Image (tube, rainbow, N blue to C red):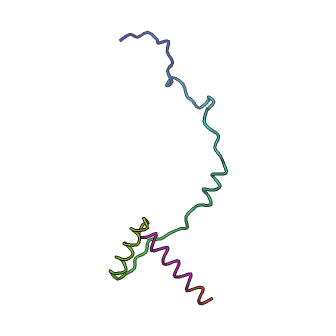
Amino acid sequence: MDKRKSLGHNPLAYSLNNHSSLDFIRDISKDAEKEEEKPSPKKIVSYYLEEKTIQKLREIADQKGKSYSALANELLASKLNEEEDKDG
């Protein structure tokens, strides 16, 4: 192998930290939208449900293309809101 120096460019020979970057300028309005879309905090819980209820939940979730927990959360929240409306 020849030990002479190459006349070519070696990108590993220097650090890019001191050089200008050609990156795009990001749109900060999208950052604000992302902050607004943060999901509410969730916890893992365990409940004993009848097998018929679980099977029906799975069938509906599969039909709608949702996860079981997302559908269960949606149905429970809806029912709890209805109960609040009756009481309040």
Q: In this rendering, is residue 48 above or below 12?
A: below
Q: Is residue 86 magenta?
A: no
Task: Tell me where residue 86 sits by quadrant.
Answer: bottom right
Majority secondary structure in the magenta region: helix
Q: Is residue 45 left or right of residue 16?
A: left
The residue that appears at 66% across and 49% down in the rendered structure is: 28
Residue 65 image position (x, y, % from top left): 42, 64
Q: What residue range appears in magenta? A: 68-82
In screen coordinates, is 18 left or right of 80? right
74 magenta-colored? yes
Q: Nearer the viewer, residue 74 or 5?
A: 74
Q: Is residue 52 above or below residue 18?
A: below
**Quadrant of the snapshot with the N terminus:** top left
- Looking at the image, which residue sits at the far right? 29
Given residues 19 and 25, the one toward you in this image is: 25
As drawn, 3 above or below 55: above
Q: Residue at x 65, y 46 (%)?
A: 27
Residue shown at 47% from the left, 12% from the top: 6
Q: Quadrant of residue 83?
A: bottom right
Q: Nearer the viewer, residue 79 or 17?
A: 79
Residue extending farthest to the front is 63
In this view of the protein, which residue sits in the foreground, 59 or 3?
Answer: 59
Question: Split into 4 quadrants, where in the image is the C terminus?
Answer: bottom right
